[in-house]
Amino acid sequence: MDDLDLLAAARAAAANAYAPYSGFAVGAAVRTRSGRIHTGTNMENASYGLSLCAEAAALACAVAEGDFQVVAIAVVGGRRDTSGGLIAGGPVTPCGRCRQLLKEAADAAGGDIRVLAANADLTEVLETTVSALLPHGFGPKDLGLG
Ligand SMILES: [Zn+2]
């Protein structure tokens, strides 16, 4: 049930994506140790390179709320159809940059993070972890910290 709530929050965020260039909407929702959920969505930019990912936005929201003990994240997305709805493709997984951001969050929380990557209608959900998505990742320990 907790996972369904997290996936639903991510899907709701995806509906608000600002993605006029790619037409690919993504929502992310992180659950923290406190039980709270923080969401984010992708926010594109005419410069393209400045576009923000949903996962990064959700993590930043958790930090802004002083609630950065992330234990799980759901990522949901898909291409928009002509009416603004989302087309259900395959599960949307975090990009390489977001995997690195999630590794930082995992290290900051002192554990791994469950990752639920889903397609737009939640009929396909890939369950994994940050450590599986980014094996041998670079983190605070590599800097002699943590
Ligand atoms: Zn990303």
Image (cartoon, helix red, strand yellow):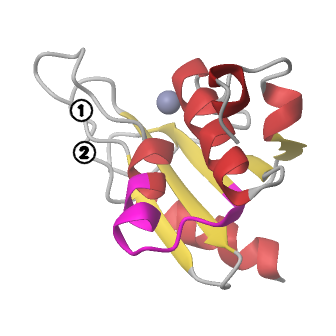
Residue at the front extreme?
144
Residue drawn at x 34%, y 31% as measured from the top left: 23
**Left or right of 94, for residue 85:** left
Residue 72 appears in which quarter of the rendering? bottom right
Q: Which mark is residue 44?
A: 1
Q: Is residue 115 left or right of residue 97?
A: right
Secondary structure at numbered mark 1: loop
Regarding mark 2 in the picture, which secondary structure is present there?
Answer: loop
* Residue, disc 2: 18
Q: Where in the figure is residue 52, as x and y percent of width and height?
A: 32, 35
| Residue type of the residue flagged with mark 1 | Glu
Q: Earlier in the sequence, mark 2 or mark 1?
A: 2
- Crowding around mark 1 (Cα neighbors within 10 Å: few <14, some 14 to 19, many 20+) is many
State if disc 1 and disc 2 touch (CB < 8 Å). Answer: yes
Query: What amino acid type is highlighted by mark number 2?
Result: Tyr
Q: Residue drawn at (79%, 71%), measured in percent from left and top?
A: 3
Which residue is rendered at x = 34% and y = 66% of the image? 64
Mark 1 sits near ligand 1, with its Cβ under 8 Å away = no
In-image side of 15 versus 11 (left or right): left
Evaluate whether residue 84 shows in this view.
yes
User: Depth check: 125 or 107 in front?
Assistant: 107
Q: Position of residue 57 (x, y in %)?
A: 38, 50
Q: Is residue 106 magenta?
A: no
- What segment is highlighted magenta in the picture? 60-73
CA distance for labels 2 and 1? 6 Å
What is the x, y in percent for residue 2?
79, 80
Please state the horizontal and vertical placement of residue 95, each as a whole percent of the image.
58, 24
